Amino acid sequence: MEKIACTLLIDDDEATNFINEMLLTDMGVTDQLLIARNGEEALGLIQYHCLAYGRCPDLILLDINMPVRDGFGFLRAFSDMQCINKESVVVVVLSTSANPSDTKITQMSNVVGYLNKPLKMEDVNQILTRHFR
């Protein structure tokens, strides 16, 4: 299986980030793993990554409810960013929210799915099969 060049986790919960990082590392599915604690930090990481590597991360796993800039705010700002390959970035929402209005986030640009936390190996395999093969 071909690895994803770069994956970005965006979540304010350190334990969730640790677990997701361990899962993705153990599965060996990504060459580079970036972690941001909120949407604002994520935008900075993406901007840096675009300058340093000339492209956006290939996969973004996005929480909805975060301080500073939430998932909705991140997606609005991300849609305005200029970066090579932005249109091909796979964004998957990863949340514990049961709020029906939060699932509407999947109607925003680049969002291809909505998964409930915690991220599982089956979820990762499904993302890879659908979007990276």
Image (cartoon, grey):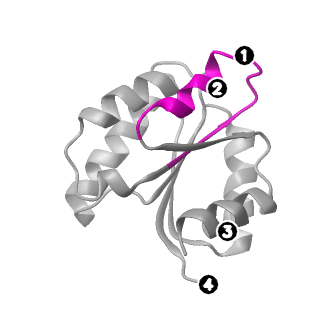
Q: Residues within 10 Å of mark 3 (few under 14, many from 20)?
A: some
Q: What's the CA distance linking mark 3 and mark 1?
A: 31 Å
State the image coordinates of residue 96 (x, y, percent, origin top left): 76, 29
State the image coordinates of residue 107 (x, y, percent, origin top left): 50, 31
The image quarter containing residue 98 is top right
Amino acid on which disc 3 is placed: Thr
Amino acid on which disc 1 is placed: Asn
* Residue found at x 43% / y 43%: 110
Count up the numbered dots.
4
**Is 54 rendered above or below residue 83?**
below
Disc 3 or 2, which lies upstream in sequence? Answer: 3
Disc 4 or 3, which lies upstream in sequence? Answer: 4
Q: From the viewer's perspective, is the residue at label 3 or at label 2 nearer?
A: 2
Mark 3 element type? helix
Amino acid on which disc 2 is placed: Thr
Q: What's the CA distance linking mark 4 and mark 2?
A: 30 Å
Disc 1 or 4, which lies upstream in sequence? Answer: 4
**Is 43 rendered above or below residue 5?**
above
Q: What's the CA distance linking mark 1 and mark 2?
A: 7 Å
Q: Residues within 10 Å of mark 2 (few under 14, many from 20)?
A: some
- Determine contact: label 1, label 2, CB under 8 Å: yes
Q: Determine which of the numbered discs, if any, sits on residue 25 in the image.
A: 3
**Is 128 rendered above or below residue 89?**
below
Tell me which segment is drawn in magenta: 91-109
Q: Residues within 10 Å of mark 1 (few under 14, many from 20)?
A: few
User: Which residue is tagged 1?
Assistant: 99
Q: Determine which of the numbered discs, if any, sits on residue 69 in the image.
A: none
Amino acid on which disc 4 is placed: Met
User: Which residue is tagged 4?
Assistant: 1
- Determine contact: label 3, label 2, CB under 8 Å: no
Q: Residues within 10 Å of mark 4 (few under 14, many from 20)?
A: few
Q: What's the CA distance linking mark 4 and mark 3?
A: 15 Å
